[in-house]
Amino acid sequence: PPYGAPPPGGAPPPMYGAPPPGGAPPPMYGAPPPQGPPGGAPPPYGVPPGAGGAQPAYPAPGAPGGGSPTSEIEISLECKGLVNKDVMSKSDPMVYAFVGEGGRWRHFGTTEMIKDNLNPKFAKCFVVKYHFEKTTTLCFRVYDIDDEKDLREEKQCFLGEVIVDLGALVGSRTTPFQQHLSMNKSVKPPSPYELQKQQTMAMMSKEQAMSKFGSMIIHIEQRGVNSNDDVIIEARGVKLAKKDTFGKSDPILMFFRRQLEAANWVKVHETEVVKKTLNPKWNKMVVKLGRMCNGDIFRPLRIECKDWDKDGDYDEIGYIETSLSEILSGRRELVLLHPKGKSKSVGTIMIDSIEIKKNLSFVDYLKKGVRMNLVAAIDFTQSNGMPDDPSSLHFRQNFDFSQLQPSMNQGGPQPNQYQKAILSIGSVLMPYSQTGRIDAFGFGGKFTNGEISHNFNLNGSDDPGCNGPHGVLDAYNMALSNVALWGPTIFSQIIRATAAMASSAQSQGRLDYYVLLIITDGVITDMRETVAEIVRASGLPLSIVIVGVGNADFTAMNVLDGDGQKLAIDGQVAKRDIVQFVPFSSVANRGMEAVAAETLREIPEQVISYFATQPQLQLSV
């Protein structure tokens, strides 16, 4: 008989996985055994397994994660033996992180600054994606912060850098990874061969002496599940030991988690200092569950209480080792142990409240109905050059824009940089729009009646809406024939108009989020007014992406990008970072998909940060 056919006169065999005749179906793959909890549900946060049950197993760092070729790696840093650059005190170190892309370094984050400390342990970490098949080169530069109000690199004092390959970190058997700091600031990422040669010369074990410039210690761990949830803690101290001779202590709390492979402690959070008291109450702490314990509530934690000193040498008051599971299960009175092992009482840390708040992801928000709206604004100032001049940034090629694709090859005539930015970014955002429309504007143009406008409808009609990115390209081409390039370069008016749209959505309770794309060739002339508008708009459902085209000096634009420091003006501080600035030339050689990826990289987190502050919209899990 054919394969799988029943025998002559017999019943057909059961399908693969079907229960035997008269028997119960076998459990699905991964389902709990019959003696497991009802319905296979895991225990709630902080509740230990029931009698006879084993403690849940948590995947070891680096374990396979569902077959995905991509993992999220959390990187924590500390330094030892930094050079002291301050005369009357110690250096105030901060680490700037970069990733090599397209032959250039791209800055993607900073740690916090630690005052007066040559051996800092940074609480703020970096999360990077690891691809087995891809080389990812990272650079960590240490600076002594001389100007806290302007955190640009050139304003600070360089203390050294370390360049590493992410794959080498992940595959290293030596944990944590330690390397000498180099005083040669790299201009561009090294080739894999150059990097391997540098690391062979610079790598050292813990036992080796540090160089005269100090060293960096790098802790890595694959991120666990539930990493985006928040741990919210309220804590206070009771009868802490007095450490100051002429006054009371200035207590500060530091949280550390144990690294499973290396069995060492990594700093994950630090509270503010409460001055001159033995019974401090610290501000409410909000720490990501991934940062606190990598999503494993049974992970050992160490809480250290110290007496803050302005010279950076803190006196230890006491410590306690516990876990989130223990605290959630009711252990709220944490009696501190003496740092030298003595039986003398040094005080107690009381946990007044603790909860784990589930946070939605960007995908969760989209599934719950959040609508993305793109607004485009194009620079019509004279510095772009006349559109008929081949050297102009507005030079017009004859294209059938309906056939133009964001992944087109680099051969033959190319659209200009404005057209590439519109097409690549618009094509990414359009699938998230229910209307498929983009409101398109121009600024810095002059009409035939002599009027100069810094906020005009690109299509020349009363309705600025265009049908997708190709509609914007058509409107842009038409505007170049009807509007004279003029100036100056002013952003504040278009930001104010877009903020009004976002404000209307917010007041009406609509689930709309706006992305304003500003494409410009030069430094703006209304910086103060622009900063004020951004600060005012920082509480609205709005993100601003600025793409700089051409070869102008865009250094001043980095002031608007709030990475590492929130914008502020006249005592008003931005509620969140809503601006991303990208020089087009830094990503254009990697293709149009790279343009969209780089410019929209921060949008998901900005969407999350906004809706997380809007409980009235009832977007809870």
Image: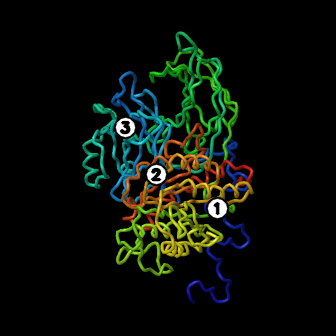
Q: Residue flagged by tag 3: what amino acid is it?
A: Met
For the C terminus, which image quadrant?
A: bottom right
Q: Is the residue 395 above or below the residue 599 in the image?
A: below
**Which three-letter amino acid code belongs to the residue tagged 2?**
Val
Ranked by sequence position, the earlier of labels 3 and 2 is 2
Residue designated by label 2? 128
Q: Is residue 203 left or right of residue 438?
A: left
Between discs 1 and 3, the one toward the N terminus: 3
The crowd level at tag 3 (other Cα within 10 Å; few <14, some 14-19, many 20+) is many
**Residue 207 position in % (x across, y down):** 32, 32
Spatial distance from mark 3 to mark 2, Cα to Cα? Answer: 18 Å
* First of labels 2, 1 by sequence position: 2
For the question of whether residue 227 can be seen, the reply is no
Q: Is residue 380 above or below residue 157?
A: below
Q: Report the mark closest to the observer, 1 or 3.
A: 1
Please report the residue visible at 54 percent of the width from the left and 72 percent of the height from the top. Answer: 472
Where residue 588 sits: x, y (%)?
Answer: 39, 64
What amino acid type is highlighted by mark number 1?
Leu
At 25% from the left and 52% from the top, the residue drawn is 194
Q: Which residue is mark 1?
A: 366
Would you say the residues marked 3 and 2 are in contact, meaning their CB atoms lie under 8 Å apart? Answer: no
Secondary structure found at label 3: strand
Q: Which mark is residue 216?
A: 3
Q: Label 1 neighbourhood size at 10 Å, few (<14), some (14-19), many (20+)?
A: some
Closest to the observer, 57 or 224:
224
